Image: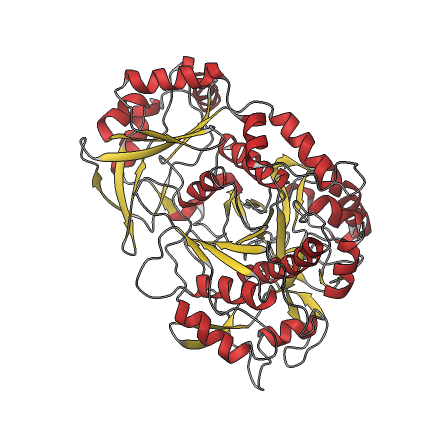
Amino acid sequence: MTAATSSPEAQQLSSVAAEDTMNALSLTLSIPWLFISLVWCGYLEYDQDVLIPEDWSHVGRVDPAEQLELTFALKQQNVHLLEEKLRLVSDPDSAQYGKHLTLEEVSSLVRPSELTHKVVRHWLQSHGITSCLTVSTQDFLQCTMTAEVAEMLLPGSRFHRYVREGQSLVRSSAPYSVHNDIHQHLDFVGGLHRLPPKGQDLSKQRPMGGVHLGVTPAILRARYNLTAADVGTSQNNSQAVAQFLEQYYHPADLAEFMSMFGGSFQHLSQVDRVVGTQGGGKAGIEASLDVEYIMSTGANISTWVFTNPGRHETQEPFLQWMVLLSNMSDLPWVHTISYGDDEDSLSTAYMTRINTEFMKAGVRGISLLFASGDSGAGCKHLGKEQNSFRPSFPASSPYVTTVGGTSFKNPFKLTYEVTDYISGGGFSNVFKMPDYQVSAVEGYLKTVAATLPPRSYYNTSGRAYPDMAALSDNYWVVSNRVPVPWVSGTSASTPVVGGVLSLINDQRLLKGLPALGFLNPRLYKLKGQALFDVTEGCHLGCLDEQVQGQGFCAAPSWDPVTGWGTPNYPALLAALLAE
């Protein structure tokens, strides 16, 4: 899982970057005035963290003649109508339930106005920028230009090269602005900020003594009541994993994994489609884990892998994937993504637009599942002896299904599940609580009122997550032809839940029903029916006097550690097949 980023203490500005920031912002202003001036002076992302984490080394300024590729997110129309449409097609009590839109219909709803197109293109052309590509929905432009032109186009920006573990990226060390005439026509510009978070170490401490069970496809199928007959058979079903961290799976590892662990059920041993460039080099544990477990849970279902396009050092891989979804009319029904960033490191403008992209996928009937993170409630140090929990995005988006993690109560037996202490969860500080979850969350806050962490640590009116969970502890993975034990994280639970939902989609499609699409409104109406409720254990929080390393705790019904619980496949299938 990649939800951990370095803490503010661990972040530094190189002297060059510091100097640039001073130049860009003339920090003589007092802080409140600085904030106001940034909002008014055309800074689209005034609250974006532009500090370069210290694990990236500064190489130097980019040559003025070097070609960069930037992504312009054009202001969309009818976003409120899109949100209403998503609510109607996702609510099982609505007459429009399951009446999903095509990409063309989404495009005609949200595409930017003629004026926006005209103003933005004129602005780009006036700087000599003509090499641009758009997407089907016409709400992104990807343009190439020299670094010199980019810095004139976006005053304040200064492009530098940074490296980490052999990966080289170009980013701006200071905030960018746009001309006031342009401000109202753009959401943000991609390719200046947001470095990929560092992949987490997915191996945990090995338990002492005894032979640990270890999680394999057979264990998962037994725990979640999948029989040998529970495999995909529909021709028009597919599922996908998306990866962004220079991680690759090896086809030979997948074949080896299936020959070792897939003997008891019908399965596929190869990925049907890779979108993007599979790099050479060693396989990544994360990539191997995602592919092996979505394909052994959602067994015998056609699987795609979206991998780093990585065509240019200025690209933001996650944003590239989102742009791609806006340009492909034929997509898998379920996507699982083990990726996240601290909410407070991202601009509100960026996250708000990404939420709109999630809505665009949801109205098309696509289910997006995100790992909840591996840092429990997280922790942000606000000042002297003052801390708060630290939510992760996209886990905190109201428009995706977020998956937490569990462990077996007895690690040596197939028993009931308890909280995995790493399982990410909590409350968004940016997005308000969606209607579909209000009564569930209020119920939790009432039930455990006496034992809740202090209210100053979290925002009780924010989107609460995760929505559901699965085992996330001690998986077996084959990577670089070697079976590796002890692999843990919500990167494991997310593809498992994805595979389960793909099997349910398979049965729905065979019955002539639409795909599940955005699951949450229906999931919350089940009120925990068809899921194994997880009621024991707490996850990590801040290591301080007040909470002493503890975040939230599991409780009956929904909780911000394991959501509604883990899937009981036959019961969940019956509940989600019901008309």
Identify which residue, 384 or 158, lies in the foreground. Answer: 158
Vertical placement of residue 104 versus 211, above or below: above
Q: Quadrant of residue 77?
A: top right
218, 98: nearer the viewer: 98
Residue at (60, 52) in percent of width and height: 377
Residue found 49% across the figure and 33% down from its top? 350
Residue 98 in percent (x, y) is at 71, 42
Vertical side of 383 occupied by 246: above or below = below
Percent from the top left, x then y, of residue 538?
Answer: 67, 60
Q: Could you say which quadrant of the image residue 27 lies in? A: top left
Q: Does 558 sit left or right of 335 as displayed?
A: right
Q: Residue at x 55, y 82 (%)?
A: 208
Residue 560 place in picture, x, y as percent = 68, 52
Q: Residue 97 placed where, x, y %?
A: 74, 40
Residue 557 visible from this viewpoint: no
Instruction: Specify whether residue 516 is in view.
Output: yes
Residue pictured at 60% horizontal, 23% vertical: 78
In the displayed structure, 218 sits above or below 211; it is above
Specify the quadrant of the image occupied by residue 498: bottom right
* Left or right of 25 on screen, residue 488: right
